[in-house]
Image: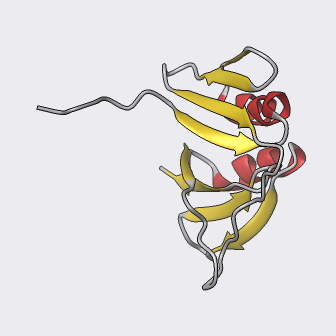
Amino acid sequence: MALAKLGVVVLDCPDPQALAGFYAEVLGGSVEGEGEWVDLKAPDGQALAFQRAPGHVPPSWPGADASQQFHLDLVVEDLDEAEKGVLALGAKPLAAEPGGTFRVYADPAGHPFCLCAC
């Protein structure tokens, strides 16, 4: 028997509304709340939350001297199409594996995420 169930993944960031808007454009869904805490309710029922962190320092990726802490894997059908979309929304490329099945980006607040082919 589990002791708990996962409620929501929360990302620290300088601007919760803006980062929730970025992920809403990528994943779909609705942004709820404003101010220090904002939720994104995705169409599939999953959720992400965004919490204001005035001293936010983006994770380092890749780096032997610093850890990325965590990353999101976002499943897509067309890597090229999804890449164009996330770059237009403000993502920054971090790594690509030529001919590979995933590509790594930083969201506008610097959190790493991967687009992964189905």
The residue at the point 85 percent across, 33 percent down is 18
The residue positioned 56% from the left and 50% from the top of the image is 72
Relative side of 56 to 68, left or right: right
Q: Camera-side residue: 87 or 1?
A: 1
Q: Quadrant of residue 113?
A: bottom right
Number of marks in the rendered image:
0
Q: Position of residue 57 (x, y in %)?
A: 78, 59
Q: In which quarter of the image is the N terminus?
A: top left
25 with respect to 18 (left or right): left
Measuring 73% from the left and 48% from the top, which residue is drawn there? 81
Q: In this view, does 96 lie to the left or right of 86?
A: left
Residue at (18% x, 33% y) in the render: 2
Q: Position of residue 106 (x, y in %)?
A: 74, 58
4 relative to 88, above or below? above
Give the color scheme: rainbow, by chain, secondary structure or one colour: secondary structure
The residue closer to the viewer here, 14 or 115, is: 14
